[in-house]
Image (spheres, helix red, strand yellow):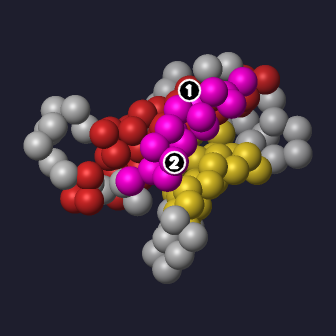
């Protein structure tokens, strides 16, 4: 959660200052949010430890075209962060069981990336 929150905070000014606002609505839940400045949409990331799932949800009934294009950039970056946690090539000596994330199946991140509309 911490790695993803750092990433989201770093993306708040992409592509323009104050384009996004990163939030963690509750310290009790593993949920992160990114609200787009035009308030037509929000990305919600749920980390479900008990199920071993990470869900990325779009909230908003009629997101703007600008939101949709920027959403794909943010989600692609989230997938990059998850890939680095799972397969950090800079540290090849790390055993799989000691990695921060072990995707199941191992191609789950690539499969998710293929579903991006503007990716």
Numbered badge on residue 29: none
Specify few, some or many for label 2: CA neighbours under 10 Å numbering under 14, 14-19, or 20 or more: few
Res. 67 image quadrant: top right
* Residue located beneath label 2 in the image: 105
Q: Which residue is drawn at the image coordinates 58% and 47% (left, top)?
A: 34
Q: Quick one: 16 or 84, which is closer to the camera?
A: 84
Decide if residue 19 is in sight here: no
* Residue located beneath label 1 in the image: 73
Res. 66 image quadrant: top right
Specify few, some or many for label 1: CA neighbours under 10 Å numbering under 14, 14-19, or 20 or more: some
Q: Considering the numbered disc 1 on the image, is that residue within a helix, a strand or a loop?
A: helix
Q: Which residue is drawn at the image coordinates 51% and 48% (left, top)?
A: 105
Q: Position of residue 110 (x, y in %)?
A: 53, 32
Q: CA distance from mark 1 to mark 2?
A: 24 Å
Magenta segment: does it hold 109? yes
User: Which quadrant, please, contains the N terminus?
Assistant: bottom left
Q: Which residues are magenta?
A: 102-117
Mark 1 or mark 2: name the one nearer the start of the chain.
1
Q: Which residue is drawn at the image coordinates 36% and 54% (left, top)?
A: 101
Q: Position of residue 40 (x, y in %)?
A: 78, 40
Q: Considering the numbered disc 2 on the image, is that residue within a helix, a strand or a loop?
A: loop
């Amino acid at each position: 959660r911490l790695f993803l929150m750092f990433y989201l905070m770093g993306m708040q000014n992409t592509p323009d200052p104050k384009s996004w606002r990163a939030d963690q609505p509750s310290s009790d839940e593993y949920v992160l949010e990114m609200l787009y400045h035009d308030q037509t949409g929000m990305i919600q990331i749920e980390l479900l430890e008990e199920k071993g799932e990470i869900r990325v949800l779009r909230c908003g009934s009629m997101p703007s075209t600008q939101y949709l294009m920027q959403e794909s950039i943010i989600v692609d970056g989230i997938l990059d962060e998850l890939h680095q946690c799972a397969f950090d090539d800079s540290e090849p000596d790390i055993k799989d069981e000691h990695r921060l994330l072990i995707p199941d199946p191992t191609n789950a991140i690539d499969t998710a990336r293929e579903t991006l509309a503007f990716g």
